Amino acid sequence: MTQLTQPVVEEWFESNKDAFAEIFLKKADISIVNKWLLMHGYSPATEQPTYQPKRGSLSTDNSSPSSPNDKNDVFFDTRHCRTNSKKYLRQDFAKSKRKNIFRTYEPTMCSAEATTESRRNSLKEMRMFRSLPPNSVNMLSILIQSRVRLPRYPSKDIDIKRDLRTKNEREFFLEIVKDISNDLDLRSLSQKIVANISVLVDGDAGSIFLVEGRGTGKPSLVSKLFDLHSGTHILPTSMGDGSITVPWGKGIIGHVAETGDTISLMEASQDPRYNDDVDKITGYRTDTLLCMPIRNGDDEVVAVAQVINKAGTREGFSKDDEKLLGTYLTFCGIAIYNAQIFEAYTKEYERNKALLEVVHDLFEEQTSVENVILKIMQRAQTLLKCERCSVLLRDGSSETSFKKVFDLAYPMKNGQTCQSSENMPDYQVGNKIAELVLMTGETINIADAHQDSRFDPNCDGESGFHTRSILCKPIRNRDNQTIGVAQVMNRIDGHAFDDHDDQLFEAFTIFCGLGINNCLLYEEIAVASAKQMVALEVLSYHGAVSAEDVVKLKSRKPSEALEWKLDTFNFNDFSLSSDDMLLAAVRIFKDLGFNRTFRIDSEVLCRWILTVRKNYRNVAYHNWRHAFNVCQFMFAALKRAGVRRHLSDKESLALVVACLCHDLDHRGTNNAFQQKTSSALAQLYGTKATLEHHHFNHAIMILNSEGHNIFGNFNSEEYSEVIKLLKEAILATDLSRHIQVRNKFFAMVDSGMKNWDDRESRDILRSILMTTCDVAAITKPWEIQRKVADLVMTEFFDQGDKERNELKIQPQACMDREKQDELPKLQLSWIDGICLPLYRALSNLDSSFKPLYDAVLNNRSCWEVLDAERLAKDAAMHTEV
């Protein structure tokens, strides 16, 4: 008779299923039936009494609850039986199917007994469920909170491995080694390791914690997998990614990672290092425990493996289990190391891809520093996964301050992303660290900001932002100079910034510097182009004076200042012809001693004055006559008043030159018009003091022309000083600047200040003198004052016509030709707002200016009479209507 083997028998049963069923029904007893039921996920037959000792205890009764002689009862007589655990879960799940956790009432023996509190609780659960996103983590959370346990079906793979182990342990070991040898996905690999170690040492549950953050100096252990009853599940945590984080050196797992020791416990809950938080979440109790480190080829701990509750014995895990698990974990360390290398390469690929996108952004956007920085910040924040990213650009005039701050934060209070590119002097978050990086040029990486002495806790401010970790790096330009600081704060996963983050952020700061540099180059090109346009426009209108004109002017002898009344405040602005004003300008330079003191060549001076006159346009008011009149008034102030004793000869020269040049190439329109039309001047000089900057640059252009430099005998230091004084004086004619400094001047005069020798006081005095001379027409006799006012209004009305006809906008009242009858009212406003306060303060400073104040009051009276006549006329017209 052929010897029967198990495969032969199984093959015969497969081909004769009816006979197999008949044999099973005749021969199988209740214990075999129950084993089959449990193996396939069903509850045992109710006729079979079950032995259910309490977890953590073992019955000492020798008698069996059912059949004492039944040897199969040992199947249930284990402290932690895997199939028994499955049975309890299935029973709970069966009960949960009969209970609707979202109904608004609890059925009882009598529905009238349902309490209001129970209904509220059920409604609360329902609202909680509906408010959560329908993902697996939130579903699991609500089920755990409702104490509903999902069935845990062991995978078929685990069953095969368990069966293989019972048949051939060597083949099983080789199988679980091959199982992990080619897996480079850390998540999948962790799942396999957890399943394999549970089967290997017959543990009821297992987990693996990977070491993260080693490069930050503050490593931790993180597990996204926790195996209960041989099924791997993701646990919901506050981090939202289903991970459990264990601090380095804390608890049993942290201790094993820190020391590299193996820990085997019979009663885990009795150990002071044990943390039962996971047990509370899962409703599972841990008794016996085996925890071992996993090392890589360099003998570094890369992970910690933990197996709990040895099945089938009350003695816990043996030394053989430790030896067997340690051998397997050696292979696991190699596999984890390979997977981590692969993950690092994958991250590096993604980072390189992101950096290429940054490069694309740099070449795509070069017209705006703000846009480039914002794009780089968005890329950096996304890739580094941080809560906040900031770029602070250095103020060129200071070593430790920032002129502009860009801040990008994840949605905070209002759900909006905060983006700012404005000047933010009150910016606080991490600014002390940023200043330190700006000064030293060194990177600062702080894992715990509030434990670092360099961090100011007050920097978090009132925004509600809490700084945990900071990575701050300098931004350098093409000359390797620090031009700003970039910083990121608070990784979203709660960890500190590691070496990979540092390297990646270094690349972002390099690209940020390149982006800023490219934008600055683009702006320089744009400015150069605008300068070229302005220069061509100027040159097309103006030309150089002829040599004959220079010789003619030089040969003429100017009259004395007394004859022309040049040194008096009541000089008639319209008394001299254009050519006579040239001679008068030469006389002013001579009488102030500039020719002798500064060795100014007479031919150079004549050529310069002629060219200055030629470079004034033929507009109604801001022309050569106005420039000369301002210069004459400055000459009178230096001669008649006592202000010259507070000024050096160089300052006096700069003031006189500034008066002649302060409106060079004026187009008859103001700064606001340049901005409205986006003129070439506005593009070149910006929107603040646009024309004043142009007047100064035009003056420099004339000085730099051949044969025109009246400062040619100055050394480099003196030349730089006088040019600076000239620029300050011309820019002071911008009324917005005058308003900024006049209050300081008024306060100094009111305090009775006599000493004006310090630098700041002289700067203010020169600025006030420039405005005094520029608006001096208001101090002239009424006939002259009225004529000047008409010229000003002519120029204003021309601009108003351009705004109405070309720009299609409504001009201001002072420039609206249709409202020219309101001139007296506008003049009164001008006198009261600007002129009277200025000349009152000057008369208090020096009595020589008192006649000017009286003249302003006299002119105001005349304008007041005209305004009264206008009002009377308007009233009469309304009466007639």
Image (cartoon, rainbow, N blue to C red):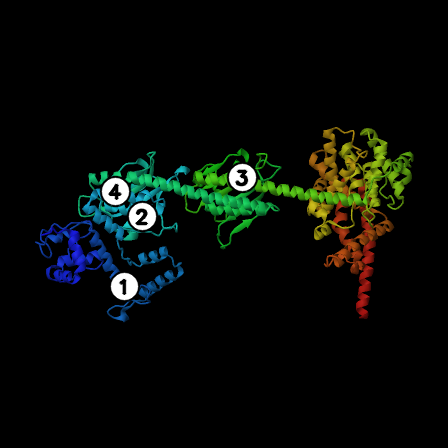
Q: Sort mark 4 into few (<14), some (14-19) or many (20+) by Cα contacts within 10 Å.
A: few
Judge whether residue 516 can be spotted in this image: yes
Amino acid found under the numbered disc labelled 3: Ile
Q: Among all residues in the image, which is located at the extreme front?
A: 1
Question: As shown in the figure, which amino acid type bears the numbered disc 2?
Answer: Gln
Residue at 29% x, 66% y is 106
Residue for badge 1 = 97
Image depth: mark 1 or mark 2 in front:
2
Spatial separation of the CA atoms under disc 1 and disc 3: 60 Å
Q: Is residue 367 left or right of residue 585?
A: left
The numbered mark at residue 510 is: 3
Q: Quadrant of the C terminus?
A: bottom right
Gap in angstroms between the C-alphas marked 1 and 4: 42 Å
Q: Position of residue 318 (x, y in %)?
A: 20, 40
Q: Which mark is residue 118?
A: none
Where residue 47 appears, as percent x and y from the top left, is 13, 62
- The 10 Å Cα crowd at callout 2, few under 14, some 14 to 19, many 20 or more, is many
- Residue 174 is marked as 4
Report the residue at 87% width, 45% height from top.
Answer: 572
Which of 46 and 782 lies nearest the eye of the viewer? 46
Q: Give neighbour class at mark 3: few <14, some 14-19, many 20+ (Cα, 10 Å).
A: some
Please identify the quarter of the rendering in which residue 559 is found.
top right
Amino acid type, label 1:
Lys
Write down the quadrant of residue 127 in the picture. bottom left
- Between the C-alphas of marks 4 and 2, the distance is 18 Å
* Distance from the alpha carbon under mark 2 to that under mark 3: 40 Å
Q: Which residue is mark 2?
A: 191
- Give percent across and percent down for residue 355: 50, 43
